[in-house]
Image (cartoon, helix red, strand yellow):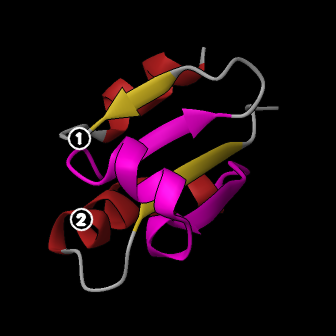
Amino acid sequence: MPPECQLYGTLGCHLCELAEEVLMPLVEHGLMVELVDIGESEALVEAYGLRIPVLRRIDTGAELGWPFDAEQVVNFLQ
């Protein structure tokens, strides 16, 4: 079972939408991804505002910054 992840992004972010498209086939195969809108937290805006989208593993805290493709995500999750 792949680890649970969070995708940090915000509404209206074109790159975040692209990241979601990359992740969708993996979600269909069991990957759990929580979408986190950084706009709801000043601390998250400060931490991720210039870097979104960012995929973060909940178990290890490891982060994968954009750009990434499906193969890079699979390797990141191993």
Q: Where is residue 21 in the image (x, y as percent from the top left)?
A: 34, 66
Up/down of 75 relative to 26, above or below: above
Q: Dividing the picture into quarters, in which one does residue 59 lie?
A: top right
The residue identified by callout 2 is 18
**Label 1: how many residues lie within 10 Å, few (<14), some (14-19) or many (20+)?**
some
Comparing marks 2 and 1, which lies closer to the viewer?
Answer: 1
Query: Which residues are the magenta region?
Result: 29-57
Residue 43's tag is none
Q: Position of residue 62 (x, y in %)?
A: 55, 20
The disc labelled 1 sits on which kind of residue? Trp
Whether 34 is among the magenta residues is yes
Up/down of 24 relative to 23, above or below: below
Q: Is residue 4 left or right of residue 19?
A: right
Instruction: Pick out the residue farthest to the bottom.
Output: 12
Q: Position of residue 51 (x, y in %)?
A: 24, 44
Q: Do the residues labelled 2 and 1 touch (CB within 8 Å)?
A: yes
The residue identified by callout 1 is 66
